[in-house]
Image (tube, rainbow, N blue to C red):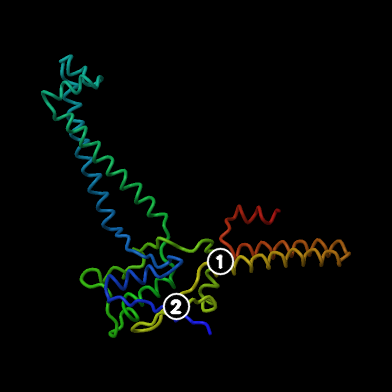
Amino acid sequence: MTDIEAPVKRRQYISGFPSLADFIASDEDRTTTIYKRFDRLAARNLLHLQSELAELQARQDEYDNEDNQTRDKEQKQALRNWNAFKIRAEADPSRLELAEEIRIKMKRYRKALLLENRLASISRPHERTLKAFRIKFFNGKPGSNKGWATLGGSSRTLYDDPDDLVALQVPEHQDRTFLFVQDHLGFLFSEGKETHVGGRVGYVSGRAITTFVAWLSTIIVAGLLIGAIVVLYKVRDAEWRLGLIALFTSIFAMSVGISTNAKRTELFGATAA
């Protein structure tokens, strides 16, 4: 007789930050890593930073105008020699302090710009994933009288605006075929369910869908290629052959255009090949 180990029971976390963090971390594909972008605050932060720099630039211009009007040779030398500039700062540190302040603010401003640029390239969450996430967050259908937000206070509105959300991880190769399978055949790739107030959230494996789509695409391409070879081998009439070549080329181009996210240049290249 052999011992059969009982399945490990999933730990239940108290509603709030613990339960929401567990829900986000429980998805192996990490598609539930959805957070608020705070675009309005980010834009305001950049506006503040650039206004600060505008004021610093105005002060720098005032100093430059003063130095341009002076006839003091030592002051003129300080404009072209760093050591002379530092010696001058011993008597009047305002210009050196301004330079250091500009350096700090400029670094902060450009870092914020680069971060915003990087964030802009991150995709928004998929519609169905966000729908499931919001059902979990609101413990039921959003707007329902029976549900309640997992987080309270001002945090209860974090996931109200879908255009102000970002998904840190989206499935790779998320082309049209992938999205079609995910939306209409996702139940075939379910890995379990979590029961909660207001409904169920199903976990669909993005990796399994990616593998399935890869095999499906391979079969379709192979079928078109083999079918074209066999048909053209059987048909002897030259005019029919030209028509069939045009037909199979059109079918191949349509299948690539519909089932993938290929660009026009890529589509032309694949068809020409």
Amino acid type, callout 1:
Thr
Mark positioned earlier in the residue sequence (1 or 2): 2
Taking depth in this image into account, of 90 and 69 the one nearest to the observer is 90
Residue farthest to the left, as pictured: 91
| Kind of residue sitting beneath label 2 | Gly
- In percent of width and height, residue 6 lies at 44, 81
Q: Residue 153's x, y, as percent? A: 20, 71
Q: Residues within 10 Å of mark 2 (few under 14, many from 20)?
A: some
Give the Cα distance between marks 1 and 2.
18 Å
The residue under the point 22% across, 48% down is 48
Callout 1 secondary element: helix
Task: Give the residue at mark 2.
Answer: 202
The quadrant holding residue 155 is bottom left
Indicate whether 214 appears above or below 149: above
Image point (65%, 64%), residue name: 254
Where is residue 143? Give x, y as percent: 30, 80
Query: Which image quarter: residue 232?
Result: bottom right
Q: Looking at the picture, tell me which residue is in the foreground, 62 or 215.
A: 215
Q: Residues within 10 Å of mark 1 (few under 14, many from 20)?
A: many
Residue at image position (34%, 71%) is 22
Q: Which residue is mark 1?
A: 210
Residue 232's disc is none
